[in-house]
Image (cartoon, grey):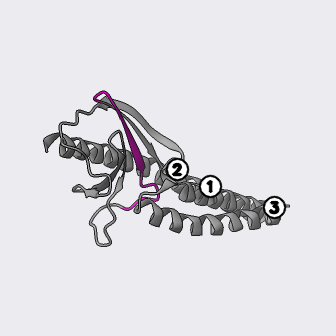
């Protein structure tokens, strides 16, 4: 049974890894993947637009992000892709949506679905593998359980720091968008 769970987790991880590649590429082309993923940011903030009509065909770039208006009341944003950027790369870059209504913005940020599923499957596989060795080889049960605990700690630390870093980045991108659209 545990072998089947381990193999199932591995298969889910491989499929979600390929989906993550699709999601990454499509996120930077601004299609519908912005509605998928776990909601990690939901805020309202003043967002005055004093600018002439917004070009909905154009992708705008800020210092750290990029954004595109779908219509005068809705904008999608994400972290700008840079191959040689000197910044911490995380598995959870936030893709966001800003909805404008009478000078107030509702800001939503989502983490990618693919990497979320991948890391969940990785954690299941890691746990099942560690517990399987603890049961099958009682002589190394302490080492197997320690191995499992280290995997959980790595997963927890990665998730915690990724969310802190990416929430800060998403808020900076929103601030940059606010400055760009209200100053021109």
Residue at x 51% of width, y 47% of height:
35
Q: Secondary structure at mark 2?
A: helix
Q: What residue is shown with label 1?
A: 120
- Mark closest to the chain's N terminus, 1 or 2: 1
Quarter of the figure with residue 121: bottom right
In the depicted structure, whether residue 52 falls above or below residue 30:
above
Is 24 located above or below residue 173 in the figure? below
**As drawn, is 24 to the left or to the right of 168?**
right
Considering the numbered disc 3 on the image, is that residue within a helix, a strand or a loop? helix
In the image, residue 139 above or below residue 179: below
The image quadrant of residue 109 is top left
- Mark closer to the observer (3, 1): 1
The alpha-carbon separation of the residues under discs 1 and 2 comes to: 11 Å
Q: Which residue is mark 3?
A: 2
Q: Along the polypeptide, which appears first: circle 3 or circle 2?
A: 3
Q: Position of residue 158 (x, y in %)?
A: 47, 54
Q: Which residues make up the magenta segment? A: 89-103
Front position in the image: 7 or 147: 7
Q: Which residue is mark 2?
A: 156
Q: Is residue 51 left or right of residue 76?
A: left
Q: Earlier in the sequence, mark 3 or mark 1?
A: 3
């Amino acid at each position: 049974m545990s072998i089947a769970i381990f193999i199932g987790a591995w298969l889910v991880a491989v499929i979600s890894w390929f989906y993550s590649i699709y999601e990454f590429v499509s996120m930077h082309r601004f299609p519908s993947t912005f509605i998928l993923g776990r909601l990690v940011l939901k805020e309202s903030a003043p967002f005055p637009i004093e600018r002439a009509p917004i070009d909905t065909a154009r992708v705008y770039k800020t210092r750290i992000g990029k954004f595109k208006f779908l219509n005068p009341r809705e904008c999608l944003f994400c972290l700008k892709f840079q191959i040689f950027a000197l910044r911490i790369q995380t598995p959870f870059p936030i893709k966001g949506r800003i909805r404008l209504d009478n000078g107030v913005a509702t800001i939503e940020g989502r983490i990618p679905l693919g990497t979320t599923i991948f890391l969940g499957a990785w954690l299941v596989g890691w746990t099942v593998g560690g517990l399987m060795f603890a049961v099958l080889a009682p002589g190394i049960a302490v080492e197997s359980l320690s191995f499992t605990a280290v995997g959980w700690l790595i997963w927890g630390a990665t998730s915690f720091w990724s969310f802190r870093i990416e929430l800060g980045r998403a808020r900076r991108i929103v601030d940059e968008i606010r400055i760009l659209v209200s100053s021109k």
